[in-house]
Amino acid sequence: MVTAVPPTIDALHDELSHLDDPTYTPEVCGEMTALIAEINVLKRERDAVILAHNYQRPEIFHVADFIGDSLELAREATKVSAGTIVFCGVHFMAETAKILNPKKTVLLPDLRAGCSLADSVTGESLEERKTELRALYPDLQVMCYVNTTADVKAASDVCCTSSNAVTIARALPTDHILFVPDQNLAAYVQKETGKTVIAWDGNCYVHHQIRPEQLRAVKERLPHVEILAHPECRADVLALADQVLSTSGMIRHARESAATEFLVVTECGLSDRLLLELPGKRFFRACKLCQYMKMITLEGTRDALLFRRHEIVLAEDVRQGAARALERMLEFA
Ligand code: SF4
């Protein structure tokens, strides 16, 4: 989907019509085509690259230089040679790019693109809980999900993403882990590793609202579909899944699997990407929209480049602390 040449109106409309979304009319696709061309020119003029998360709107994929999940984007951010990174994702992801690229300008097209999960823990509350628990378990290590602010990462021993959380928990030289902030991913890590994982009381509102009844209803009608679920879902949902995978793990699996029909249990943007990239396979959705991810638009991305808006700035001590947790993750992963 990453393309250097802007699509024609007909090609974009033809592509987006596969999504069965009535908002993508020929007129709307015409406006988008003009914006995509404008953004591509601005990227060259401003020495910028665009990194986009898998949950973004499909039209954003047309201006992205790289599309991926949190781990892939964190890795890609370390390789960028351009002076400016425009991050089409949410705030903590743009912060992660800045943590790993202190000399580069990192822009987030819309400051309202936050994350309810990242907002459920602060650096200060984590320091308090860590002190309490270390009195009980002196070997306690703090693992933070990448969906956290920079000050929470700085207060943690190691960071993780959904694709490497189990690997990192296994590799940590301790049996006691405080996992922040996603309680569902914490439960999954505990189940997979057998370690004592103390969960923070947070969850992703998008994944947490998906219920097992929804999966059972689809499975009754379509017993042959393979169910792919994200580990931010509740344990009773994961228990019904054939595969528990990160978003990029789902893409790889769907591409390589002999199966041709899948139920995709995560944010809806991933289903859009799968439908567009693998037209020979069928994807049913048990997905929900993330209001934060969808705040990023082509207009906002154009304006971020045009007006150098909204720059991510971090205190250097916080950046260095967060970088340690991220670098440790990249070493383990
Ligand atoms: S999908 Fe959930 S975890 Fe991801 S940005 Fe939205 S609220 Fe945060």
Image (cartoon, rainbow, N blue to C red):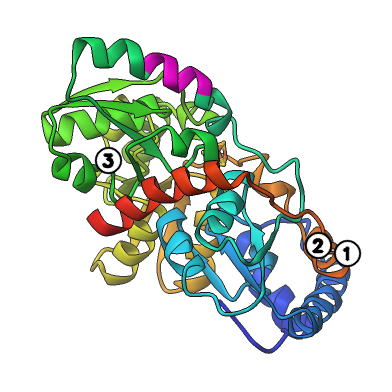
Point out the quarter of the image occupied by ligand 1.
top right
The image quadrant of residue 223 is: top left
- The overriding secondary structure of the stretch rendered in magenta is helix
Is 84 a magenta residue?
no
* Residue in the image at 59% along x and 63% along y: 52
The residue furthest front is: 317
Is 126 a magenta residue?
yes
Q: Which residues are magenta?
A: 124-129
Q: Give whichever of discs 1 and 3 has the lower sequence position.
A: 3
Which of label 2 and label 3 is nearer to you? 2
The residue that mark 1 highlights is 307
- Amino acid carrying label 1: it is Phe
The residue that mark 2 highlights is 304
Q: Position of residue 197 (x, y in %)?
A: 23, 24
The residue that mark 3 highlights is 241
Q: Is mark 3 within 8 Å of ligand 1?
A: no
* Residue in the image at 15% along x and 45% along y: 171
- Amino acid carrying label 3: it is Ala
Q: Is residue 285 visible?
A: no
Q: CA distance from mark 2 to mark 3?
A: 39 Å
Quick one: 70 or 222, which is closer to the camera? 70
Q: Secondary structure at mark 3?
A: loop
Mark number displayed over residue 146: none
Mark 3 Cα shell of 10 Å, populated few (<14), some (14-19), many (≥20): many
Q: Work out which quarter of the rendered image holds the C terminus and state it.
A: bottom left
- Amino acid carrying label 2: it is Ala
* Residue in the image at 59% along x and 50% along y: 95
Q: Secondary structure at mark 1?
A: helix
Q: Give whichever of discs 2 and 3 has the lower sequence position.
A: 3
Q: Is residue 135 left or right of residue 195?
A: right
